[in-house]
Image (cartoon, rainbow, N blue to C red):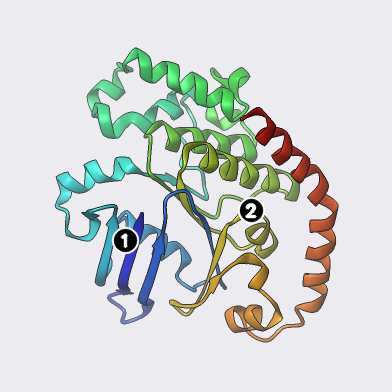
């Protein structure tokens, strides 16, 4: 379980990015963070693993208080938090397999990683993950030869190689077309279900958030203004989060899109349940 208590972030300029944020995320829950640009979504995710140092408050992952750890302890704790970046954060000159194996760096150390000395079971797991994300035929390709969706799949496999307890996902669909965006969000959702992983996903696409998240948290000016089920996100709540706008056309479009994809998605879930 991830617990965020009274978390605040104020920059040296005096600007407040987060104000008294309180969130609790149980094991296996997929949470979408939505809100306008500058609302504090990315800052919140990065405060969890202390890529950004919070000004006040506490973050717990299970019984571990992340905000009290020293540098060495934090390095160890970050193994339990898989990060998936908007810009993929791949090393272009390295192969797909080498980028995935870099996710084990927190366990093996820099020099063993630099010399490609990974345990055999880790290599086997990397192969298995690449197969799971649909990239088994791209193992030897350089990262800079991949499409955006393929690069994001490499980033997902790399994060999972850490064997994390939670995924921190920063705008995974920002640079992707609508079809690929759906595929990536569905993949993250499925992997979380398979591994009983929690996830916090910073995402701008409200429709994707409603379709693939168990819970939606809306931020505005660094404060939580909505925390609830996807179907509770009506015009009033959208206005509270984003400000005045005619949301009805968007909601109508979302309902039409949901109806279009409901049957295939439900068929997939039913077939998956039948195999269990």
Q: State whether residue 25 is above or below residue 86.
A: below
Say whether residue 191 is visible. yes
| Residues packed near mark 2 inside 10 Å, few (<14), some (14 to 19) or many (20 plus) | many
Residue 269 is situated, as x and y percent measured from the top left of the image, at 70, 40
| Extreme-top residue of the structure | 120
**Horizontally, is 245 left or right of 217 in the view?**
right
Dot label at residue 142: none
Query: Considering depth in this image, is 20 or 53 the residue closer to the camera?
Result: 20
Q: Which residue is identified by label 1? A: 52
Residue placed at 44% from the left, 21% from the top? 125
Residue placed at 36% from the left, 80% from the top? 15
Residue 68 is situated, as x and y percent measured from the top left of the image, at 17, 59
Query: Considering depth in this image, is 129 or 30 the residue closer to the camera?
Result: 30
**Horizontally, is 211 left or right of 67 in the view?**
right
In the picture, residue 139 is in which quadrant?
Answer: top right
Q: Which residue is identified by label 2? A: 212
Which structural element holds mark 2?
helix
Q: State whether residue 210 is above or below residue 20.
A: above
Q: Earlier in the sequence, mark 2 or mark 1?
A: 1
- The Cα atoms of the two marked residues, 2 and 1, are separated by 27 Å
Which structural element holds mark 1?
loop
Image marks 2 and 1: residues in contact by CB distance under 8 Å: no
Q: Which mark lies nearer to you, 2 or 1?
A: 2
Residue placed at 15% from the left, 44% from the top? 72
In the picture, residue 126 is in which quadrant?
Answer: top left
| Residues packed near mark 1 inside 10 Å, few (<14), some (14 to 19) or many (20 plus) | some
Residue 118 is situated, as x and y percent measured from the top left of the image, at 32, 18
**Horizontally, is 142 left or right of 264 in the view?**
left
**Horizontally, is 214 left or right of 21 in the view?**
right
Residue placed at 51% from the left, 21% from the top? 128
């Amino acid at each position: 379980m991830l617990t965020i208590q009274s978390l605040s972030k104020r920059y040296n300029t005096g600007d407040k990015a987060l104000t008294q944020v309180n969130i609790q995320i149980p094991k296996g829950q997929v949470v979408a963070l939505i809100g306008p640009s500058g609302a504090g979504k990315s800052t919140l995710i990065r405060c969890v693993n202390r890529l950004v140092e919070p000004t006040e408050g506490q973050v717990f992952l299970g019984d571990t208080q992340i905000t009290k750890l020293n540098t060495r302890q934090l390095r160890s704790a970050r193994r339990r938090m898989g990060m998936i970046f908007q810009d993929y954060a791949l090393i272009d000159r390295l192969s797909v397999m080498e980028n995935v194996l870099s996710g084990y760096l927190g366990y093996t150390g820099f020099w063993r990683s630099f010399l490609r000395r990974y345990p055999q079971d880790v290599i086997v797991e990397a192969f298995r993950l690449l197969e799971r994300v649909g990239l088994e035929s791209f193992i030897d390709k350089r990262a800079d030869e991949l499409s955006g969706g393929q690069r994001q799949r490499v980033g997902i496999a790399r994060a999972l190689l850490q064997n994390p307890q939670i995924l921190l996902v920063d705008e995974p669909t920002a640079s992707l077309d609508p079809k690929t965006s759906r595929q990536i969000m569905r993949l993250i959702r499925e992997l979380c279900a398979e591994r009983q992983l929690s996830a916090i996903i910073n995402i701008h696409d409200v429709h994707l958030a409603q379709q693939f998240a168990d819970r939606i948290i809306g931020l505005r000016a660094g404060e939580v203004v909505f925390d609830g089920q996807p179907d509770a996100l009506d015009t009033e709540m959208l206005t509270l989060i984003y400000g005045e706008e005619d949301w009805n056309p968007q909601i109508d479009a979302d309902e039409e899109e949901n109806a279009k994809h409901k049957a295939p998605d439900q068929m997939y879930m039913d077939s998956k349940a039948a195999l269990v």
